[in-house]
Image (cartoon, rainbow, N blue to C red):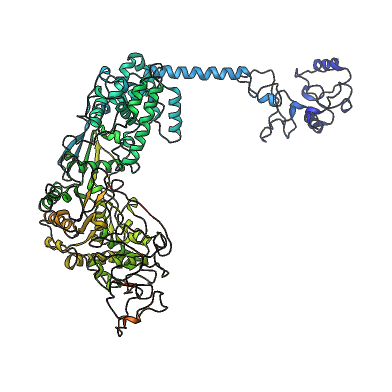
Amino acid sequence: MSEHRRKPPQPQEGGRAAARRGQSGSSSGRRAAPRGATGSPSDSYGSDSYGSGGEERAYGGRAEARRAAQRNPGGRRRAAEPGRGGRRAAPGGPAGPGRGRGHTVDPDKKRLIDYPRAGKYGWRRWMPSWKLVSGLCVGFIGSLVVVAGVGYAMVGVPNEENAAALSQNNVYYWADGSQMVAAGSGQNRQNVTIDRIPKAMQWAVISAENKSFYQDSGVDPMGIARALANMARGGDTQGGSTITQQFVKNTYLSQEQTVTRKFKEMFISIKVGTKLSKPEILQGYLNTSYYGRGAYGIQAAAQAYYGKEAKDLKPGECAFLAALLKGPTYYDPAGNDGIDPTATAEANRKRSEARWGWILEQMHNDKRITDKQYQDAIKKYPLPQERKASKGMSGQIGYLADTAKKYVLNHSDITEKQFDQGGYQIKTTFQKDKVEALSKAVRKVEKEKLDPEKRELDKHVQFGAASVKPKDGAIVALYGGAGYDNGHFNNNADTAGVPVGSTWKPFVLAAAMEHGTYRSDGPLSPLSKYNGNDHLKVRNNDGSYVLKKDNTPFFQENESDRPWGYISLRKAMEQSVNTPFVQLGMDVGMRNVRDVAEKAGILDASFATLNPSFALGTSTPSAIRMADAYATFAAAGKQASPYSVTSVKYNGQEVPGFEKPRITQAMPENVANNVTNVLENVIENGTGKNALALGRTAAGKTGTTDENKSAWFVGYTQQLSTSVAMFREDPKSAKLLSMNGTAGEESIHGGDTPTQVWTEYMKAALKGETDLGFPQAEKIGTIQDEVGAPTPKPTPSPTPSETVTETPSATPSESSSPSPSPSDTCGFFGCESDGGTENGGVNNGGTDGGVTSTPTPTETNVDGGNGRGNGNGGLFGGPGG
């Protein structure tokens, strides 16, 4: 039975008097055991008996004492046994039994903190008293007051503004150490007084960020608590700060996110709130905040986004600029996807419009603008003007600095805001003479080929180019466009959305030589033969035909209807014939093609969907990435990611993170050398013949895309790998336009204008350099022709009536005709005649082996039967900078 339900023992004979007698008879002066400790009256003699030392001794010795202790609620715990680890007796209870003599706790002894509580039992023993609770609260609050008082006394308002608030220029250097340009926001800041800042701008930031600005003390304790909690979890400390706190951070403190900085911000904010008026604080905040585009302060922002004075801003424009304060990287509708892939122009426009509308709504709800002002402002989103070139950023300098900036931001903890505050010294990989040579080559060809004033189709033609060092990755030159000073702010060397066409075919061949096909036991020789005829059906690995979405067969087209018949892959590369490489890609597996390209240096974000057209260059890597990937072939398979910055210093101190990229073996050496050997033949005998004017050993590939929307040439020597892209773009929609008719030509081929630019540049860039040639390629793989190819020994030609029927036969066709007619389509086991009546879709292809974009085949069974993976367009501006 539990103790709280046990019937209490009856009092012994003699009651209190007996207890008094026992107490008075104790010679030692010790207190007698509590009444009932030894059990019922029958458990002891009628009179008290004492042992030596004056202690009362119960009849029965220790066993009886144990039983008594068990019956006593206050004596559950055993007394501590010296040296034996025994338990200590509960306060007020008798010593429990043990192997040694126990010790009792004096219940009358006072403790500083009475916890656990003496004289209490059960749950009451562990319930703190109101005195204890109130004492602890008073002590805690008192400690906070003392800490706050000491902090407030010790932290003073700095006498001068933080150097970061005084924004400086960043200085860029050429590879040889000479200065390229000093650029940044050092000359893009101008303070204005509060009376020259529209009321709408003032209320926009108050309604959006700190509604209680005119009532609060300058700090938000809850916001600080949230920030510290986030910091403890490793998150961002932003959010919850008042306008006063943000002004203090912008003006007096660094941007580091630490507990110390947060407390300094709090104390300085309190002091600033007592020294400056609210209008003065608001004025300071608007003059020191960062709005993007290198603009610090409302005056610079008004000029950068709307080309006007701050005092002339309209309510809608004020709401737009207030939205930027949440983060210009993600709220500038011009986009910043080179810094963050999620900050595209489309995504930023969507975010900006949403926050702009919300801020106007808050201003209206707070009665800071009238109903009419709100209705007028909300009608139309105030789209800002395009970016402007800052001083010194003319010509190619703007693109060089932009590329270097992206690289710095992607390889360090420096934020865009910190970078634009200036003070950085950036040494780049760019070589001035090569940059000038590339720009000169583009201008020369443009002048010779294009006349926008006379030919409408010559308008909006653009070039993008990049040059990279093999075995190193350093970007030595690039061409980004007409220049910031001419209103062209997109860096064409680092652009997305321009398909590379047949310059993709070397990756298909490399994958075949490294992985083989589903039919081979190992690498495939480039002398293997595939059907090069026009208008062919494409087969899956199981022999079935690739179907379009409407379940009709997909046909691949060439540039012309020339009946090539079965030709070697080497010959197909030389003449840029499409059909062999589409079928080869299916046989190898598009996933293997993708992996080889990625290892060579192509970014994951730039890959297109893995369907048959993937083999023909529907992907959209930048000119920088294509030059770097071909540099992998030039370097016998060694790959180094492209880089544009070798060192960064801030206030004279080196910033870590800018070592050279690590070199890896991306593909077997002999695979790369064989690709080079095949691409040498493209220049010597194929579509790249115009590059022979270089006068030295080189390898390269031409590429032209569907509907002639872009044309490429990518080529290399052992010293340099250079890519040149040419395309037309609608300036309003940014969509690619056909170049058919451009330069007075029926169509633009990669082997024409782009190759001419490449050759002009490489002549100047390699002047005085030794012609190193290329390493000797060793024979690779086995010759395994495509299914249906004629046997090596010719057989008598069959009559037309012997043509295989629509249903594939069980054995390969023995037709000896090396060149089936254009109307023949080769099936799984041979060539079959469709008579030109098949209702299959036709892919028009492109000149020079174009890409296939319409109609699109189904995306199943394109990976050797696995159906894996897809991708989308991407750009260079991330890790490779």
Is residue 112 visible from the viewing direction of this image?
no
Place of residue 606 in the rendered image (x, y in percent of width and height, measured from the top left): 32, 52
Place of residue 121 in the rendered image (x, y in percent of width and height, measured from the top left): 71, 25
Q: Residue at x 32, y 31 (%)?
A: 380
Most extreme residue toward the front is: 837
Place of residue 69 in the rendered image (x, y in percent of width and height, measured from the top left): 77, 29
In which quadrant of the rendered view does residue 842 lie?
A: bottom left
Q: Is residue 746 left or right of residue 293?
A: left
Q: How many marks?
A: 0
- Does 684 sit above or below residue 735? below
Place of residue 813 in the rendered image (x, y in percent of width and height, measured from the top left): 36, 79
Q: Is residue 84 left or right of residue 624?
A: right
Is residue 169 visible from the viewing direction of this image?
yes
Name the quarter where the N terminus is drawn.
top right
In which quadrant of the rendered view does residue 837 lie?
A: bottom left
- Does 776 sit above or below residue 877? below
Q: Nearer the viewer, residue 18 or 297?
A: 297
Q: Nearer the viewer, residue 571 or 459?
A: 459
In which quadrant of the rendered view does residue 756 lie?
A: bottom left
- Does 508 sit above or below residue 525? above
